[in-house]
């Protein structure tokens, strides 16, 4: 973006504080004061359950500027608006329609795997176009407007991740970013409390089409997506097994470096190798390959781009520590991502140890969905360490599905240190360990204590 403080106030319908320098120019916006190192980054003073960015606004306004919605923090070079979140959306919508209207956006959404697919897609798109990728987890109605404002003016394409927590959000996001193409990675159980059922989640995900001029969506052959997309113009359904689909993966293999397969789409066969494990990453790869090719990326460039893929943060980060293969996947958890992590563990060497915790925000669905994870644990793990209240259902289900009771251990959340000590006594060189649970559980602490 490139706006003066006065222009920002006019676009947002805000009030420029007395004594402000309305000619100050801003080229970026951020809500994290720690990331603002230059005076041309506008500070968005957002409020959360446990923080209030307004306390940083006056100091940042001395050299820069800020959007605020609390008049108590008004100071020269601040713009007072009714709602900072709504002001960001208005400002981003203004820029998207008037200044970057020709930007081609590939939107990535889904219950799990969004960030992985986004990072893959960004590599593929960047192999052929000047491409911007949305940062971190800025996939919400608050984060995405900042990403739209931060897209460099010389970029022709962008890969933007779209998340949701409440009904109606995906439609609003889509109307803002106006995608040229979209990928839905899957329809699972994340946020099922807000949407009532997987059917409700699926309908919300499909609202990514709302802002499209022409429908262009790439989806896996999951039950609900097939139901809604099989007769939809502009939809391509991808499969890992059904060769009658318009796009499918053939010759799927797990190698010592990751997954390899042949992408079959548009009458062409393209060999692809991804340095990431798990059959779910074959689907992620197939989806973004097809979507990128549909947006004009040559097949050979797209295939080569996969070689640079690296898993982000704590999302299925696989490494070898002290001779032990560690699968650290503590960022978030759903039944689908739990099962994906366990399937990766099953393909590793040595004794396979799963350290699993609670999946949060499942409400009345918690027990059956944790029990479903227990079935997978019995199939893929040799030893199971469960930590948490709902994790008790995982442990019980694993035993009922054939795992020896002496191979299953259960600890309450507060006893994570004891769980870590047990793990250290059990794991040996050559073994493989999966750490998986929702972000706000203590599984990450077990990983830290064990120093793996």
Image: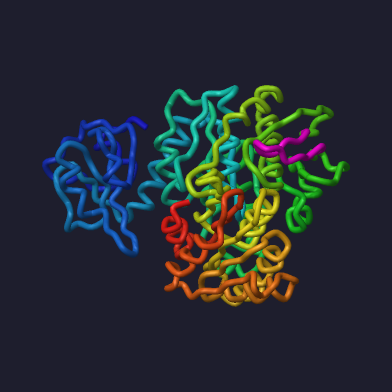
Q: Position of residue 143 (x, y in %)?
A: 42, 48
Residue farthest along the right direction in this orientation:
244
Main SS category, magenta section: strand
Asked if residue 214 lies left or right of residue 409, the reply is right
User: Is residue 254 on the magenta stretch?
Assistant: yes
Give me the residue at 42% from left, 55% from top.
448
User: Is residue 448 on the magenta stretch?
Assistant: no
Which residues are the magenta region?
249-262
* Vertical comparison of 369 with 283: above or below: below
Give me the residue at 28% from left, 51% from top.
45
Res 32 visible: yes
Give me the residue at 66% from left, 72% from top.
371
Depth order, front residue of 347/295: 347
Depth order, front residue of 363/380: 380
Q: Position of residue 51 (x, y in %)?
A: 29, 60
* Vertical comparison of 91 with 294: above or below: below
* Vertical comparison of 223 with 104: above or below: below
Residue farthest along the left direction in this orientation:
19
């Amino acid at each position: 973006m490139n706006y003066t403080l006065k222009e920002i106030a006019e676009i947002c319908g805000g009030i420029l504080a007395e004594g402000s320098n309305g000619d100050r120019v801003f080229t970026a916006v951020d809500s994290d004061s720690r990331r603002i190192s230059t005076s041309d980054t506008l500070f968005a003073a957002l409020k959360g359950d446990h923080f209030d960015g307004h306390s940083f606004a006056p100091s940042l306004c001395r050299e820069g500027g800020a959007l605020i919605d609390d008049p108590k923090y008004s100071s020269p070079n601040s713009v007072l608006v009714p709602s900072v979140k709504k002001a960001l959306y208005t400002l981003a919508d203004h820029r998207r329609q008037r200044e970057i209207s020709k930007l081609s956006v590939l939107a990535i959404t889904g219950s799990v795997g969004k960030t992985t697919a986004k990072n893959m897609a960004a590599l593929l798109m960047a192999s052929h176009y000047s491409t911007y990728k949305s940062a971190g987890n800025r996939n919400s109605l608050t984060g995405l407007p900042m990403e739209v404002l931060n897209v460099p003016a010389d970029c022709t394409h962008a890969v933007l991740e779209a998340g949701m927590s409440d009904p109606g959000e995906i439609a609003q996001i889509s109307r803002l970013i106006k995608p040229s193409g979209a990928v839905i990675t899957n329809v699972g159980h994340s946020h099922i409390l807000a949407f009532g059922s997987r059917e409700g989640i699926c309908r919300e995900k499909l609202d990514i089409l709302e802002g499209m001029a022409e429908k262009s969506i790439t989806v896996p052959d999951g039950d609900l997506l097939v139901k809604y997309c099989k007769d939809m113009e502009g939809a391509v359904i991808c499969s890992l097994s059904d060769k009658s689909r318009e796009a499918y993966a053939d010759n799927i293999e797990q190698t010592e470096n990751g997954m390899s397969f042949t992408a079959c789409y548009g009458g062409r066969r393209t060999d692809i190798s991804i340095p990431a494990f798990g059959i779910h990453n074959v689907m992620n790869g197939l989806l973004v390959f097809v979507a990128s090719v549909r947006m004009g990326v040559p097949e050979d460039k797209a295939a080569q781009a996969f070689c640079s893929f690296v898993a982000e943060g704590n999302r299925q980060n696989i490494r070898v520590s002290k001779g032990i293969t560690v699968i650290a996947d503590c960022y978030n958890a759903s039944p689908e991502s739990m099962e994906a992590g366990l399937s990766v563990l099953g393909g590793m060497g040595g004794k396979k140890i799963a350290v699993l915790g609670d999946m949060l925000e499942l409400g009345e669905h918690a027990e059956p969905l944790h029990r479903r994870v227990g079935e997978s644990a019995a199939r893929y793990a040799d030893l199971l360490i469960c930590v948490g209240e709902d994790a008790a259902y995982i442990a019980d289900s694993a035993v009922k599905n054939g795992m020896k009771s002496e191979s299953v251990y259960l600890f309450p959340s507060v006893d994570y240190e004891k769980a870590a000590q047990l793990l250290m006594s059990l794991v040996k060189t050559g073994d493989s360990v999966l750490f998986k649970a929702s972000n706000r559980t203590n599984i990450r602490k077990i990983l830290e204590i064990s120093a793996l």
